[in-house]
Amino acid sequence: MTLKERLIQEIEQASEESLEQFFQLWQQNQKAQSSLSTFFQTSPLAVYCAEQELDISRDKSGYGDRFEL
């Protein structure tokens, strides 16, 4: 049995209440992902990356955790 067939079988056997709860959780998750994605797309780092090439190679001449932009 394929994964799709198993999912269909589970959905057919599930109660309306549990399907409604699942759907509500799924919608909340989709909204949260969308909000997070929008946040990062409008962040200063995303704008900088879109406008210029970002070089994140380490600068070996100085501090160990220093990055060059």
Image (tube, rainbow, N blue to C red):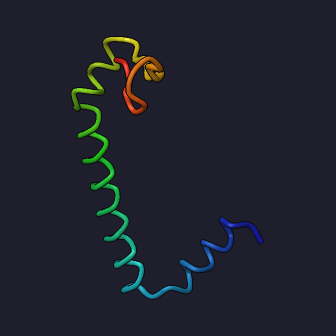
In the figure, is residue 39 to the left or right of 23? Answer: left
**Which residue is at 37% across, 70% downward?**
23
Please state which of residues 43 and 60 is positioned toward the viewer in this rendering.
60
Please state which of residues 67 and 63 is positioned toward the viewer in this rendering.
63
**Which residue is at 60% across, 72% downward?**
8
**Which residue is at 67% across, 74% downward?**
6
Quarter holding the C terminus is: top left
Kindly give the residue lying farthest to the top in the view shown. Answer: 52
**Which residue is at 28% across, 37% downward?**
40
Quarter holding the N terminus is: bottom right
50, above or below 44, in the image: above
21, above or below 26, in the image: below
Kindly give the residue lying farthest to the front in the view shown. Answer: 62
Q: Quadrant of residue 29?
A: bottom left
Image position, residue 47 (x, y; %): 26, 22
Q: Quadrant of residue 26?
A: bottom left
38, above or below 67, in the image: below
User: How many numbered circles are shown?
Assistant: 0
Image position, residue 33 (x, y; %): 33, 51
In the figure, is residue 48 to the left or right of 57? Answer: left
Q: Quadrant of residue 7?
A: bottom right
Image position, residue 68 (x, y; %): 37, 19
Please state which of residues 24 and 12 is positioned toward the viewer in this rendering.
24
Please state which of residues 41 and 1 is positioned toward the viewer in this rendering.
41
